[in-house]
Image (cartoon, coloured by chain):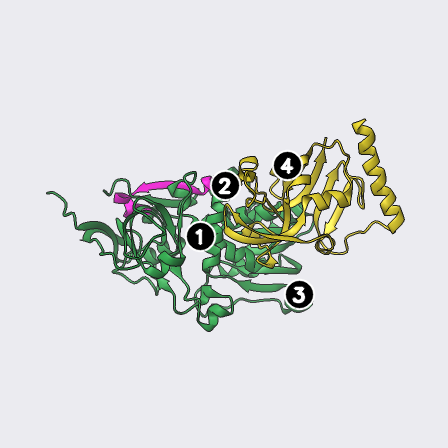
Chain colours: A green, B yellow
Amino acid sequence: MKPNPNEMQIAELVALGKIEVRTAPIPTVGEGELLLATRAVGLCGTDVKAFRRGHPYFRPPCILGHELVGAVREVGAGVDAFTVGDRVVCAPYVECGGCPTCRRGVGELCEHKAFVSGALQEYVLLPSEVVRQGTFLVPPEISDGVATLAEPLACAWNGIERADVREGDTVLIVGGGPMGALLALLAKAITPHVLVSEISAPRAAQLRRLGLAVADPAEKPIEEALASAFGVPTAHRVLVAVGARDVAEASIARTAPGGTFLLFGGLPKGEGLAVDAFAVHYLEVSIVGSFGFRLEHFRDAVAWMARHPHALDGVVTASVPFRDTAAAFARAGEPGALKTVIRFDDAR
Amino acid sequence: MKRILGLGVVIVSLVAVAAFGQVPAPTGDVVLKLTGAVALQNTEGGFAFDLDMLKALPFVAYMVTDPWLGDQVYGGVRLADLLAYIGVPADAKTVVIVASDEKEFPVAMKDALYYPILIAYTSDGNPIKASKGGPLKLVYPYQIEGMEALYAPEQWSWYVIEIRIEF
C-alpha cells in the first residue's frame, strides 16, 4: 500500500518495556515554528529509564527522545533564520528567561519552559520559542551522530561549571557511561589531570580509546588509583555520574580539602546521602548537584563541538536504524556501549 | 647583526628590571607561562603570570565576530604588549600558543607585534567561562580585513596556558 503523504512513522512507548512503530499525522507548521525531518536521535539514560521502569514525566503512551538532529523541512511564517534543508540541532527545552528563577541565572530550573515533543518520530515540530533561541545550524564537519550529543554535552557543561573545574585541578569522574565520558572529555579540555572510575572492562576499553585514563575500582581501591595518578588519594573535583547512593557516599570522601563534589547522576526523590560533616565543615568540601542545562550551556555546547568537531567521535558506539528502535532500547546500556543513536535514513 | 639586535632587546629588558626593582612573581594561581626565548624570568625557564599580573598590563577590548560564538566583546592583553613586557629577541620568529589540551597554535612574530591579537580574559565584561574557551583565550581581530585569511577560525586557541617564543 502506498504511504499516505500526510502521515509519518512514530516510535511510541505504549507500555513499560514496549515500543511500537505506528503512523500519525505530520504536524502542521504555525507562525514562528519549524518542522524538522528527523535525521538522528540519541538515546539518553532518562529515555531508557522511562522505557524500562517508568518516569513521572514520560508516562505511556508517549514518544521518547530529546537528543535530536534534523533537517528543516518546512519553515513557519516569520522565521528568517533558517531555510528548508538546513541541518540543525535544537535544545529540547528553553527556559522562559523572565521568571525569578531565570533572573537568578539558573534557567535550568525554570518552571515555565517551552518543550519540544518526543523526537523518535519522522518529523518534529519546534515551537517558536525553541526556534527563536534554541535552534542552531550544524557545521558540515560534525556527523549526525555527534550532533545528537549537543544536549548531553550542554548538561555536562552545566556539571563542569557547577563543579568549578579549573586548569590544574585534579578531577575524578565516577562512572564512565556516556555522561561520564562527556564530563571527562570536557574536564580534560580544561585540565590534563582527569581519571575516570569505571567498573566495566569493555566500557573502560572504550574510554581508553577516547584518550581517557581509567581505573577499575574492583581491581584496586580508587584511593590507590588516585594516589598513583595524582600523588594523593583525593581529587580537587569529584563528579559522580552514576545514580547509586553508596557510590556517591563513598566518593565524597575522595574529595580533596577545599574541593567540590558534584552529584551529576540522579537519585530517587527522598533518597538520603550520608555525609561526614567533618568534610563539609573542617575540610570545606562543597557538595553540589547539577540537573539539565540552560540555553547558554546548549549554545556553548554547539560552539564547543564546532570548535572541536572530532573530539566526540568515539562517544557514539552504536548507530541503529529507526525500524530497530525497540531493540535498541532493550540493548542500551550493555557493557561496552557508550551512546546509541537512532538514525532515520530508513524511515523515509 | 640580527642576533646583536636581539641581544640588545634582552639587555634592555633586563636593564629595565634592574632599574625598576624586583621581577614580579605570581601570588595567586598561575594562569599563563611564557617560555622559550624570553628575557624576563621569574621561574626556571620562563615567566609565570597570575591573573592579577595579566590585568596589570594594558587592557584592550573590542567587538569581534567569534567564529564559534558570534559577536562578543573580548578584553585582555595584546600579544604585542605581553611580548614587550617580557622582552623577546628581535630575531624570534614564532609565538606558539599552547592550550591546556596540548594543542599548539603558531602565530608569526611579525603578526603578533603588528595586529591587536589578544590573550583575552573577559567576554562582554565577564571572566571567560570554560565552556567558551576561558579563562584565557586567543582572539584574532577578525574586524580587520584579511585577518581571517591569515588565521583561520581553527587557529582561535581555547584554554591558553602557555606562550612559547621560538626562533
Mark 1 lies on a secondary structure that is helix
Q: Position of residue A7 (x, y in %)?
A: 18, 50
Any mark on residue B107, and which?
4
| Residue holding disc 1 | A152
Q: Nearer the viewer, mark 3 or mark 2?
A: 2
Give the Cα separation between the discs numbered 1 and 3. Answer: 30 Å
Q: Same chain for the residues at labels 1 and 3, yes or no?
A: yes
Name the one closer to the observer, A291 or A285.
A291
How many dots with numbers?
A: 4
Residue range highlighted in magenta? A308-328
Q: Residue at x 79, y 28 (%)?
A: B2
Residue sticking out furthest to the front: B145
Give the Cα separation between the discs numbered 2 and 1. Answer: 14 Å
Mark 3 lies on a secondary structure that is loop
| Residue holding disc 3 | A284
Q: Is residue B6 above or below residue B77?
A: above
Q: Residue at x 33, y 49 (%)?
A: A329
Q: Position of residue A148 (x, y in %)?
A: 39, 47
